[in-house]
Image (spheres, rainbow, N blue to C red):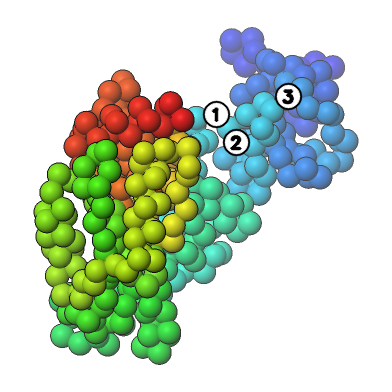
Amino acid sequence: MSVATTRNGAPAFSSDSERWAAVVGRDRHADGAFYYSVRTTGVYCRPSCAARQARRENVGFHATPADAERAGFRPCKRCRPGGDGVVEARAQAVARACRLIETAEEMPSLAALADAAGLSRFHFHRVFKTTTGLTPKAYAAAHRARRVREALPQSSTVTEAIYGAGFNSSGRFYAESGRVLGMTPTRFRSGGSGAAIRFAVGECSLGAILVAATDKGVCAILLGDEPEALVRELEDRFPRATLVGGDRDFERWVAKVVGFVEAPALGLDLPLDVRGTAFQQRVWQALRKIPVGSTVTYSQIAKRIGLPKAVRAVAHACATNAIAVAIPCHRVVRNDGSLSGYRWGVERKRALLEREARS
C-alpha cells in the first residue's frame, strides 16, 4: 500500500485504511496526525497507544483531540492524547459556559451550555463538574445566591432583589432563602439583624482563637493576639446580628479546633456555613481537598478550578477566607515554595505547616 506523505516526507495518513494500519502498528509517526476513538469504551487515543487493540468496527478517527471530545469521547489515561492544550481548551470552554450562566436572565438549558462550550451534553456536564467542582445547576445557584446577597442591601424591596437576581418567583426564593443566605431575606438585608451567632474564645499555642457559628454551621474561625480584637472583628463581619456567648456544648467545638491546631493528625470535621461568591466557594472547596501535611501553589489551585490565569483572584479568595484551618488557606504557598502573606500572620502559617508536616 502506498502511503501519502507531506512535503517533509512524513506520512499524511489521508485515508481511514492508512490510519487503521497506523493504529494496528502503533506507529508513533502517526501521533499528532490524527486520533482514534473506541465506541465501546468511550475514550480516544493516540495511534501509538499501548492499550488493547479495539475491533475495527468500533473505531472512529478524528483530526484533533477537540474533535474527539466534541463527539463525546474522553482522553485515554494511558497515552494522554489531550496534553496541556486540551486542558486549556477545556478551561476556556467551561469559562464560556460560566459567562453564559452569569449573564443570562434565566438558567440556560444544558444543551445551550454544551453548545456554547462546543461539547456534547454528557461530556460537557462531566467536564464542567471536574473543572469547577460544581454541576452547572449548582454553579448557577451559587452565582444567583451571590447576586441576591449583593442586591438585597441596595434594593428598595426584597421582591426587587429577588427578581433582579434571577429567581422566577418569590415563593421559590423564600423556600431556599435559609440555604442561600443563612437567615431570612429581611434579616440579611438589615445586616443580619436578629440572627443569632454563637461564639466562644479560647487559647492555643498560636494565641487567641475565636469560633463562631450560625444554626447552619461554623461561620468564622479567627486567630489573633487579643480576644477582644477577635470579638470586634466578628462584630464587624456581622454588624447587626445578635452575638451569643457559647454554652458548654458549643465550647466543645472550640476544643476540637484547638485540638486540631495543636495536633493536626486528629483531623477536623465540623459543619461549615460558608458564604462567598461562586468563585470564592470554588477556591475554598479546592483548599479543603488539600491533604494535611501537603502544600500547593496559587497557580496549582487556579488550574484545579479550571482558571489557570486567575492566580491573583485565587490569592484574594484565600485572603478573604474567614474560617481558619477548617478551610486551610495556610497550605497555599508561592511557586518557589516560600510563604506568602497570611491573614493571621506568616509566623502562624509557618507554625501550622510545620506541625502538619510532622504529623
Q: Tags 1 and 2 in contact by the CB under 8 Å rule?
A: yes
Decide if residue 229 is in sight here.
yes
Residue closest to the eye, 126 or 243: 243
Q: Which residue is labeled 2 in the image?
A: 65
Q: Where does the N terminus fall, quadrant-wise?
A: top right
Q: Of the residues shown, which amino acid type is indicated by label 1?
A: Gly
Separation of residues labelled 1 and 2 (CA atoms): 9 Å
Position of residue 167 measured from the top left corner of the image (x, y, whole percent): 37, 80
Residue 166 in the figure: left or right of residue 13: left
Query: Tag 1's secondary structure?
Result: helix
Separation of residues labelled 3 and 1 (CA atoms): 14 Å
Position of residue 101 measured from the top left corner of the image (x, y, whole percent): 40, 63
Q: Which residue is labeled 3 in the image?
A: 49
Query: Tag 2's secondary structure?
Result: helix
* Residue 144 to residue 128: above or below: below
* Residue 320 to residue 20: above or below: below
Q: Residue at x 15, y 53 (%)?
A: 227
Q: Residues within 10 Å of mark 2 (few under 14, many from 20)?
A: many
Separation of residues labelled 3 and 2 (CA atoms): 14 Å
Mark 3 vs mark 1: which is more N-terminal? 3
The quadrant holding residue 301 is: top left
**Numbered-mark total:** 3
The quadrant holding residue 309 is: top left
Mark 1 vs mark 2: which is more N-terminal? 2
Q: Which residue is labeled 1 in the image?
A: 83
Q: Of the residues shown, which amino acid type is indicated by label 2?
A: Pro
Query: Tag 3's secondary structure?
Result: loop
